[in-house]
Amino acid sequence: MSTYEKIIGLAGNPNVGKSTVFNELTGLHQHTGNWSGKTVGNTSGEMEYNNSKYLIYDLPGTYSLYTNLAEEKVAQDFVYAKEYDVMIVVCDAVCLERNLSLVLQVLDVTKNVIVCVNLIDEAEKKKIKIDLKKLSKILDVKVIGMSAVNKIGIDELKECIEKFEKKNEENKEKTFCENDMQDFINKSEEICKEVVHFEKSDCNERDRKIDRILTNKITGIPIMLLLLGLILWITIIGANYLSDILFDALFFVGDKIEGLLNNIGVPLIIVDALISGVYRVLAWVVAVMLPPMAIFFPLFTLLEDIGYLPRIAFNLDPIFKKCGACGKQALTMCMGFGCNACGVTGCRIINSTREKLIAILTNVFVPCNGRFPMLISIITMFFVGTSGGLLSSIYGVVILLGIILFGIFMTFLVSKILSKTILKGEPSSFILELPPYRKPQILKIIARSMLDRTLFVLGRAVCVAAPAGLVIWLLANITIGDATILTLCTQFLDSFARIIGLDGVILMAFILGLPANEIVVPIILMSYMATGEIVEMSNVVELKNILVQNGWTYVTALCTMIFSLMHWPCSTTCITIKKETGSWKWTFLAMLIPTLVGMAVCFLIRSIVNN
């Protein structure tokens, strides 16, 4: 027998604040997004009210119950199964007419419905008046006006859930329409004429004026690139200071722990393995990875919160269509800048399996935050200079932006090739809703980006970096003859690596950096310096001298950056790809494709320079 007082479904169009209502009811932190289909599975949570428990299912956003789209069928199946006591349908007060169509479709299935007209505060700002009592009378269900983000109407909804009495629907007859989508649309229009009143003739004029600039064919993409460049510049400047502080703090703590272990008599080999191996790799990962994530993710979430991300998809949709892919891939590509694993998970918003696989296989072509430190360091050492200053930092951002644009270009190119070969097909159409521009919720942005993204991604990286640190230490300290295993491996790879503009040390560092891209540079240093342990090296001038002494040139630097941009995904991303595709075949291809492309480009660069 169920321990819950009631089972509740929570339905609604995408981008109506449905998941925010869910968060407020349950206290769970369910991430909300400003693009269609962000919630792609039934997320459940418990609501406790007046000593009773209620189970609430947050259904995927859907525009219709008459659909063949995989994610929308989840909501469709739930509604038709009727294994719930009450269905809450959330609407957007600003565009009620479009939302009412789904309400009518749900009412066509069940009368056990509560309608929540959310974002009522935004409607008031736009001088939109809604007669909620009249709407309730027409629909013959309880209608609640609310602003979930401001907690307005939440208590009324909880009370309504508690007092709701499930109706007997064994002989329920159709109420509004006869399963014809156009009927629902027409009826929605008729109802809104009676209950919605506009005091301003064009309440959305401000948004339209902004969109004429941000989604313009001429200005849209340049503005997008400027915003990306600004975010990268802020991330680079801020991360440099924070990384230095973390480096000093973490290596200081490591030295103290090492001293403590030595004082209590722990065998030297165990101390070296734990501190020089496991701890210092973890320290590198945290010091290099945390600062850019802590800056980039909130800035990215800020763009999402104000409603700009769907505009990026709108601007890039024509290009992706020409590549045989889906415009939603623009959103997953943007997510990849923070973490490729997050980008792969985000591919769930793409309905077509074929297009989802294209997005997954090409997501690694945009550099994640773990690759930014290496790219930034190489640009600073070999292409900008170490003098610092505003002009140098801007110049560095321009070069970094050029590298990123090359990665985006390769995303388009490889997507096109995949759509013409192993993943043949025509691009599917999809509904892309451009939500109204909204005032960002700064505190929630910080909390969401830190908890949902930064700490989550960092936690996964740390889990794989710890055992990797031990393996790296063993390779660097176990000798066969007069050479360590690490040295023997780099010598074995050297001949091939030089064909693609690298050397054996660099290629081996990328291989050992599979758990986390952040440890590639320290492995290179450890190999060149033959220290047998990860060393702290925050001085860029000293780092460049070591690299030059070991044969690095501008060509080596460029090829290393290109290979950093295009090679196999990190282990966290690979695990995520296997989970999302359910196939080792696609996981293997996701590793092979960027690696072959990266090697081919590096070989081409080296060949051109040498000739």
Image: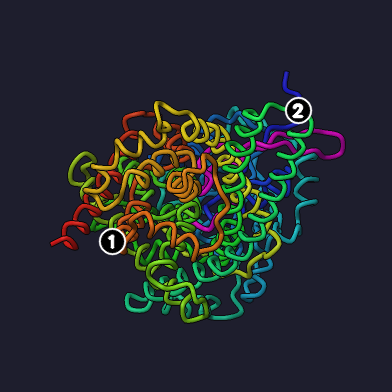
Residues shaded magenta: 32-61
Q: Which mark is residue 555?
A: 1
Q: Position of residue 604 (x, y in %)?
A: 19, 56
Residue 22's x, y, as percent? 67, 46
Badge 2 marks a residue whose secondary structure is loop
Local SS, label 1: helix
Q: Examine the image and state in which quarter residue 47 appears.
A: top right
Numbered tag placed on residue 265 in the rendering: 2
Please give left or right for residue 126 compared with residue 64 in the image: right
Residue placed at 44% from the left, 44% from the top?
527
Q: Residue at x 34, y 64 (%)?
A: 405
Quadrant of image for the C terminus: bottom left
Residue at 72% in and 27% down: 266
Of residues 338 and 83, the one nearer the viewer is 338
Q: Does the magenta-highlighted stretch encompass residue 65?
A: no
Q: Is residue 54 magenta?
A: yes
Q: Mark 1 is on which residue type? A: Val
Classify 98 as above or below 518.
below
Cα separation between marks 2 and 1 = 49 Å
Describe residue 516's horizontal placement relative to residue 601 as left or right: right
**513 left or right of 245?**
left
Disc 2 marks which amino acid? Answer: Gly
